[in-house]
Amino acid sequence: MGLTILITGASAGFGASMARRFIRDGHRVIATARRTERLEALHDELGSDLLALALDVTDAAAVAALPGSLPPAWREVDVLINNAGLAMGLDPAQKASVADWDRMVAVNVSGMMHMTHALLPGMVERNRGHVINISSTAATYPYPGGHVYGASKAFVTQFSLNLRADLVGLAVRVTDLEPGLCGGTEFSVNRFGGDTTRAGAVYAGTVPLTADDIAEAAAWVVGLPPHMNVNRMEIMPICQAPGPLAIKRN
């Protein structure tokens, strides 16, 4: 039988690609996001195996109420994919907007924590489930302007590892997916405040990962035998690699 999979940030990018992939694989998807018109279009495309729900992960009360508000047939969530996240700005820390910092922490950190806290007890009670958190290679490899984005994703990675430590011995899995350079999504457009020219320059001359590649990774870890847990998966395109430490010479 197919699984019931809840994906946050499902209106575009990784989330929409994962919804398409999991439904193609015979599962049901609860797709949540703030943009209801995008969710409705996704429902029209994918049909009754997709339940579209408007949800802002920064609304702690709405997140806490989510499990009890689901239709009865959808309440046993087998897989939670904490995909909602964003980067804002690329200015150095001393010039960055503190409002952007607060927004990244609210979505990338608090939203992920609250979603996990809402749905994990049911998984533990049923002794089955899988939490997949979307982190980033920025959690490991710093770069200029990455400050709070990278730090927020480092939190996601460390939270994932510690969560798995809490769950040892239970049949509840936790996986941290860490994509590198990935094009074809709204990530850089949002980071640069809608500047599509600046966003496009990030990927010029490269063959980056795609949202479908990340959906492939998520589908693979979900489909593994239930005794197997992939703790972390770092994914880069072949045009990208970790670089040497920066040295400023006079």
Image: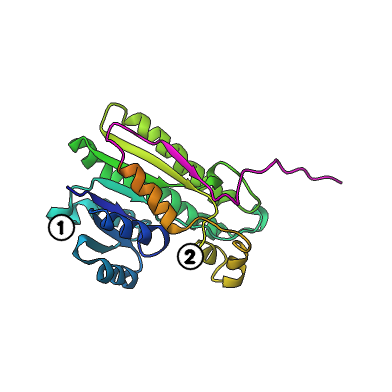
- Amino acid tagged 1: Pro
Q: Is residue 225 magenta?
A: yes
Instruction: Report the residue at 20% width, 60% height from top.
Output: 49
Q: Is residue 221 left or right of residue 127?
A: right
In the figure, is residue 154 to the left or right of 19? right
Q: Does 85 sit left or right of 147 as displayed?
A: left
Q: Position of residue 190 (x, y in %)?
A: 51, 65
Q: Quadrant of residue 151?
A: top right
Disc 1 to disc 2, C-alpha distance: 31 Å
Mark 1 and mark 2 residues within 8 Å of each other at the beta carbon: no
Label 1 SS? loop
Which residue does the numbered mark 1 point to in the structure image?
71
Q: Is 37 rendered above or below residue 24?
A: below
**Residue 53 versus residue 163 in the image, above or below:** below
Task: Give the camera-side residue of 48 and 142.
Answer: 48
Of the image marks 1 and 2, the number of the one nearer the N terminus = 1
Residue 44 visible from this viewpoint: yes
Report the amino acid beneath label 2.
Answer: Glu
For disc 2, the marked residue is 186
- Residue 221 is drawn in which quadrant? top left
Q: Is residue 114 visible?
A: no
Q: Position of residue 61 (x, y in %)?
A: 29, 55
Q: Regarding mark 2 in the picture, which secondary structure is present there?
A: loop
Which label belongs to residue 180?
none
Density class for disc 2 (Cα within 10 Å; few <14, some 14-19, many ≥20) is some
Kindly give the residue lying farthest to the right in the view shown: 250
The stretch of residues the image draws in magenta is 224-250
